[in-house]
Image (tube, rainbow, N blue to C red):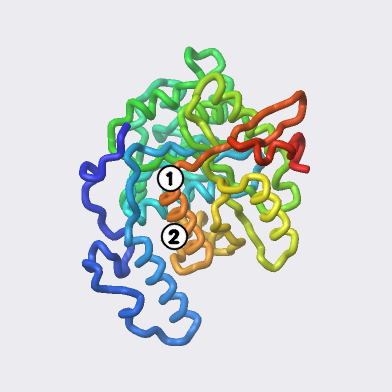
Amino acid sequence: MRSDANAAGPMTDPVPGPRSESTGGDVSRETLPPMDDTPIGRAAQLAVEALGRAGEGLPRPDQTRVMVVANQKGGVGKTTTTVNLAASLALHGGRVLVVDLDPQGNASTALGIDHHAEVPSIYDVLVEGKPLSDVVQPVHDVEGLFCAPATIDLAGAEIELVSLVARESRLQRAIEAYEQPLDYILIDCPPSLGLLTVNALVAGAEVLIPIQCEYYALEGLGQLLRNVDLVRGHLNPKLHVSTILLTMYDGRTRLAAQVAEEVRSHFGAEVLRTSIPRSVRISEAPSYGQTVLTYDPGSSGALSYLEAAREMALRGAGGGLNVEYDGQDAHIARQNNEYGQHSMSEGIK
């Protein structure tokens, strides 16, 4: 499946505000009318600037980038990261599909997609063999953003997949058969390392790992990297860890800075320079069936996700990690073996 900028068609503004494609480049931050020096005025100014940056557009990839958002630790911001990065990339002019592979269906909720039991969902694709195009729905708030929803039926898919032929590659086949042009596919994984996550790892080429800036952030990460290594060795040679995003960063605490420093020292170039702060607006947005980009585009969370999406798009696929194992310990090693002495079992020591 190849990304086709011409086939994608013209993008329209999902929300009001000066956009470069609609203004012809004549409007800039310097030419915006002055805002009142009040909290509401400053928030409006930030929103206009954020949407203006989003409308500038980014280079579209030559081929569809299929990115797996995974971390078996719960509460690290997988779903939040998936939907907000997807919305940011779509606002930048891309065509993006979110595949909700979590039985809780939180990504579907955040995108305002109906996902009750009778709705055609990714369960029907994996278990019943239904074409992916039959379940994909457009996201009304953001032009160019689409979602394959998850329903509660997906909770039993782990058991049902066990007896099916080619159980690990059913999502991959569905994505390969999807004919609509896309720039990005982001797969939101459940907080586990079962068959659903394996299907995602087989279908994708890149792994995006959100890491919470908390004490337990790195615990169990070795098992995820080991699974990535196993899938790469046996089922998907193209798979690699391309992006690591620090989430829930609280600049007021020394702990957050220490966790960020440790993650950057171990993973280096794979870690995005942009980190996502703790934000009430990010937490509030799903209750309105929106991403933070449409709920409050001038908030710190929205601005951070816009910058993270821009950085991720511009840097391309990245170099990935080699993950080597010796006995029960996992050792992270770059291509040049720079970090080969750091061990990881339950956490990175």
Picture mark count: 2
Relative to 218, is 287 on the left or the right?
left
Q: Mark 1 sits on what residue?
A: 316
Residue 58, x across and y down, in percent: 34, 54
Up the image or down, 255 lies above or below 237; here it is below
- Sooner in the amino-acid sequence: mark 2 or mark 1: 2
* Residue 130 visible from this viewpoint: yes
Residue under the point 49% across and 24% down: 236
Relative to 38, is 266 on the left or the right?
right
Q: Secondary structure at mark 2?
A: helix
* Residue 141 visible from this viewpoint: no
- The crowding category of the residue bearing disc 2, from other C-alpha atoms within 10 Å (few below 14, some 14 to 19, many at least 20), is many
Residue under the point 42% across and 86% down: 36
Residue under the point 72% across and 65% down: 253
Up the image or down, 49 lies above or below 130; here it is below
Front residue of 217/293: it is 217
Residue 99, x across and y down, in percent: 44, 38
Q: Secondary structure at mark 1?
A: loop
Task: Check if mark 2's residue and mark 1's residue have beta carbons within 8 Å.
Answer: no
Residue 196, x across and y down, in percent: 54, 28
Instruction: Give residue 163's quadrant in the image.
Output: top right
Instruction: Give residue 53's quadrant in the image.
Output: bottom left
Q: Amino acid at mark 2?
A: Leu
The label nearer to you, 2 versus 1, is 1
Q: Mark 2 sits on what residue?
A: 293
Q: Amino acid at mark 1?
A: Gly
Q: Residue furthest bottom?
A: 37
Residue under the point 50% across and 18% down: 167
